[in-house]
Amino acid sequence: MDRSARFSASVPVPGRPAKATLALWRNILDSLGAAVIVLSPRLEPIAINSAAESLIGGAHPNAAQIHELMAANPWLAEMVSECLATRAEMSVAEARLIAGPQQTAVAAHLSPLLDDCAGLAGTVIMLLDLSYRYAAAQSAGVGNPEGALGLSPAGLAHEVKNPLTGIKGAAELLLGMLPEGNRGRQYCELILDGANRIANLVEEVLSVSGPQKLRLEPINIHEVLHQALRTAGVFPPEPNGIVIEQSFDPSLPEIAGDRAALERVFLNLVRNAVEAITPPGRIRLVTRMESEFHLNANGRKQHFLRVEVSDSGKGMSDDEIAQLFTPFFTTKPHGTGLGLVLSQQVIGFHGGKLRAGRSNELGGMTFKVTLPLIRSEAARPDHQPSRAPDSSS
Ligand SMILES: Nc1ncnc2c1ncn2[C@@H]1O[C@H](COP(=O)(O)OP(=O)(O)O)[C@@H](O)[C@H]1O
Ligand SMILES: [Mg+2]
């Protein structure tokens, strides 16, 4: 395969770069497990890496083949034209890519390709093959993969992580080799930025083990919350301009939980609250017994505790709230949009619920987590349960 022809034409490093540098660029792109297809605004292929060639089934796809690909995949064609029209990044967590006789479940991420003068030079399509996910779900005995999170599993995350480390290392080396003011530095920074973003995403996916991997032990929810506050770097001491209020019920019984997984859930909620606030502001953590209960399969009452994380931040529009638990939904330049989805999954594995709403008291958002207590008998007589917590506000 004559890769150099493709990449020497497509990577605009100024001033005739050394052969070795070109080879490095090529290797970086070809080391990616994700398929990368770079198209001009007229949908001509500018660069295509090895993973993309395998995914779309053929070396050196030409403009006609790209047209066929778009015709067979209207969802992709629509995303490309929207990306070109709005210059916005966009993602889809799962879609079916049809390429000739081949159909593959993929996650897609599109970004605009900008030239040195911030002019639109095309679009960069990144496609992640999700078939690993199905294989992993089947081997783990998880019944219906369609019912899964809509994310790549740990297996895929590991596959992505290994070459990613190489890409980051190579881009850093390359950056060090280029003199100040060289335009190539910009491209290295783009690679590093993208690689760091993927690395964060992978870390988040890896940080949540499947249900079979949760290690439940009796835990005190306040220890978990304190650890999350410490890890978020907000208590103690409080950050400048943000007051952390804690209103805890110290008599709450223990829950059966995976300490590390729950710490990540509350860490994400606290971080989101901090990120929503332009100081001065306020974050309030409240714990209490949930006054409602579930009847479990044996007809016994299952009681819950509730944790609320509220903030005085900028809040969210109705549209944003509707997308809150959609994988990859983020309004942050370096967000992954996975924190809440994964948190909801972890809380669900524990038999609880994670819900969001506006905070009437503080003006920003409130995230409410309910978690079942270890023993239903642990409920105290002064709390008169009435109905299941998932139907409450
Ligand atoms: N407390 C909050 N206040 C305002 N918006 C929030 C809050 N928590 C989450 N969000 C919104 O939900 C989006 C998704 O959050 P999350 O899943 O944690 O991913 P990320 O933090 O990586 O963006 C955020 O980008 C933000 O727009
Ligand atoms: Mg987050």
Image: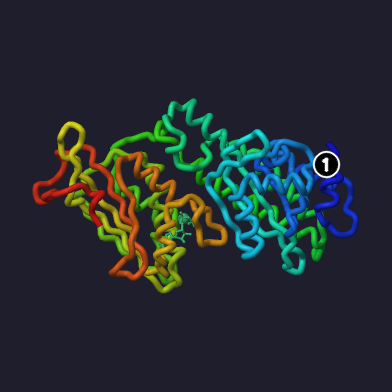
| Residue 269 pos. (x, y %) | 40, 56
Kind of residue sitting beneath label 1: Arg
* Residue toward you, 274 or 132: 132
Residue 141, picture quadrant: top left
Q: Secondary structure at mark 1?
A: helix
Q: In the drawing, does residue 74 fall left or right of residue 330?
A: right
**Picture residue at 42% right of the left edge, 29% below the top:** 143
Residue 165 shows up from this direction? no
Q: In the drawing, does residue 105 fall left or right of residue 165?
A: left
**Picture residue at 55% right of the left edge, 44% below the top:** 95
| Residue 295 pos. (x, y %) | 18, 39
Q: For mark 1, what is the residue?
A: 3
Q: In the drawing, does residue 2 fall left or right of residue 118?
A: right
Classify the position of the C terminus by image quarter: bottom left
* Residue toward you, 312 or 89: 89
| Residue 362 pos. (x, y %) | 32, 69
* Residue toward you, 299 or 246: 299
